[in-house]
Amino acid sequence: MITTIALGVGAWGQIDDVRAALKLGVDCLVAGETCEWQALRYAEDAGLGMIIAGHVNSENPGLLSLAKFLRGKLAIRPVVFLDAGDPYQYF
């Protein structure tokens, strides 16, 4: 059962981030990317669940929100959000 989740976006999800999540006492770390052979195995051994969303996928919602915010603040300059897209293909 998951009761507490930590969220890290982008490259957040490496072994030091796993250790930090464990110190916080969370049950699951949702992260952008990780090193599977190191951080993911460390988390597994420690009983910490991990969900890896992908670097771009985890950053895009915040960047889209930032672009909308900046449009309101910088009305004299165009602000454009460029979606990098998910670099992976899912079958």
Image (cartoon, rainbow, N blue to C red):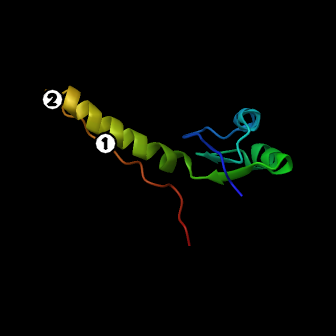
For mark 2, does the 10 Å Cα neighbourhood hold few (<14), some (14 to 19), or many (20 or more) residues? few
Residues under labels 1 and 2: Cα distance? 15 Å
Figure quadrant of the N terminus: bottom right
> As shown in the figure, which amino acid type bears the numbered disc 2?
Ala
Picture coordinates of residue 12, whole percent (x, y): 61, 38
Judge by depth and name the residue closer to the eye, 25 or 47: 25
Looking at the rendered structure, the kind of residue marked 1 is: Phe
Residue 78, compared with residue 87, is above or below; it is above
Residue drawn at point x = 62 percent, y = 52 percent:
52
Marks 1,2: beta carbons within 8 A = no
Position of residue 16 in the picture relative to residue 60 (left or right): right
Q: Residue furthest left?
A: 76
Residue 87, compared with residue 58, is above or below; it is: below
Task: Please give the name of the residue rendered at 69% of the width and 35% of the height, measured from the top-left corner.
Answer: 17
Task: Identify the disc placed on residue 4.
Answer: none
Quadrant position of the C terminus in the picture: bottom right
Vertical comparison of 12 with 40: above or below? above
Image position, residue 13 (x, y; %): 66, 41
Tell me what residue is drawn at x 72 percent, y 32 percent: 20
Is disc 1 surrounded by few (<14), some (14 to 19) or many (20+) residues within 10 Å? few
Q: Is residue 70 left or right of residue 19?
A: left
Q: Nearer the viewer, residue 74 or 25?
A: 25
Residue 38 shown left or right of residue 3 in the figure: right
Residue farthest right in this picture: 45
Give the label on residue 75, or none: 2
Image location of residue 8, percent across then percent down: 58, 39
Can you identify the residue that label 1 sits on?
A: 81
Residue 28 rendering spot, x and y as whole percentages: 68, 49
The part of the image, by quadrant, that contains residue 32 is top right
